[in-house]
Image: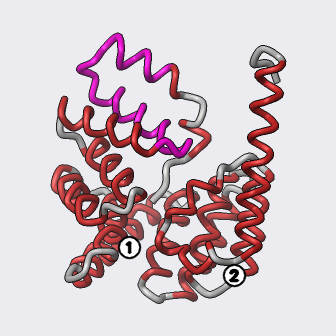
Amino acid sequence: MFFRQGRYALAIEPWKMVTKLSPENAAGHSNLGSAYHVTGRLEEALAAFERSVAVAATPGGHGGLGTALFYMGRFEESAAAFEHAVRLLPSDPSLWGNLANACDEVPGLEARAAEARDRAIALMLERLELNPNDAEGWLQLGSWRADRGQFGPAREATERALALAPADVSVRARAAVSFEMAGDRERALALLAEARAGGYAIEVLAANPSLAALREDPRFQGLLQDGAAERAGSEQFNAQNGGRE
């Protein structure tokens, strides 16, 4: 489960202004939470999503809340949030897939995880029949099929996503997760390196339980260190030049 960085990474201040001017704007709080999430500010993301669902129960708010809780390791609470989300919008395959991911990490919810993931796959296949050029849809389908051990179809779906969005670093980074799960560490690392070079903050992926083994790989740790060093240099440059790049 991921938020697309390009959409949110530079949007913290504008969304903070929206929520200040309109504190009962549930979508505004949810979008602020998404902006915090992609920059790794999980505690602030959680607070924003909690405010969003307090204002109004929406699929996006509960979905964002579940995502923040997931990356904080609070898996049982994450699963509960996604259960709320799928009740509000049962036709959304992404919410079902995220529910499955959370249930994977909670002992005793293995059957619910499989049920939710199969539901996500079925709904996404229906959606892709109508729009076969949806790179995001193929990417998610690949991830879910990898989770179900369907590695051949998972690779096909992920390759299709990469072909449809060759310049999207977010797609490349998240495709790496599917290849890692399918046992192709070399392809996963290559995609992560490309994504990082394109500006994707791969630190966001580090908390994903599916990447536990990859986190121990010195090559992945090197990518994290390189990315942190580049961002530190960029921040120093901006500070010295009045925020201009």
Q: Mark 2 falls on what kind of element?
A: helix
Tell whether position 30 is magenta. yes
- Look at the magenta stretch and give its main secondary structure: helix
Residue receiving disc 2: 185
Towards the viewer: 103 or 138: 103
- The residue that appears at 55% across and 87% down in the rendered structure is 151
Q: Is the C terminus in the top left, top right, bottom left or bottom right quadrant?
A: top right
Q: Is residue 109 above or below residue 98?
A: below
Towards the viewer: 213 or 182: 213
Q: Which mark is residue 121?
A: 1
Determine the residue located farthest toward the top in the rendered image.
Answer: 21
- The residue that appears at 78% across and 14% down in the rendered structure is 242
Q: Is the N terminus in the top left, top right, bottom left or bottom right quadrant?
A: bottom left
Q: Would you call the spot at circle 1 few (<14 residues within 10 Å), some (14-19), or many (20 or more)?
A: many
Tell whether position 141 is magenta. no
Find residue 91 and report its horizontal and vertical position in percent. Answer: 26, 58
Q: Which mark is residue 90?
A: none
Query: How many labels, in total?
Result: 2
Residue 231 appears left or right of 48? right
Give the mark toward the camera: 1 or 2: 2
Residue 26 appears left or right of 55? right
Find residue 103 and report its horizontal and vertical position in percent. Answer: 28, 72
Identity of the amino acid at label 2?
Arg
Identity of the amino acid at label 1?
Ile
Residue 139 in which image quadrant: bottom right
Q: Mark 1 falls on what kind of element?
A: helix
Residue 87 appears left or right of 173? left
Q: Find the magenta span and give its range.
A: 14-41
Q: Earlier in the sequence, mark 1 or mark 2?
A: 1
Residue 100 in which image quadrant: bottom left
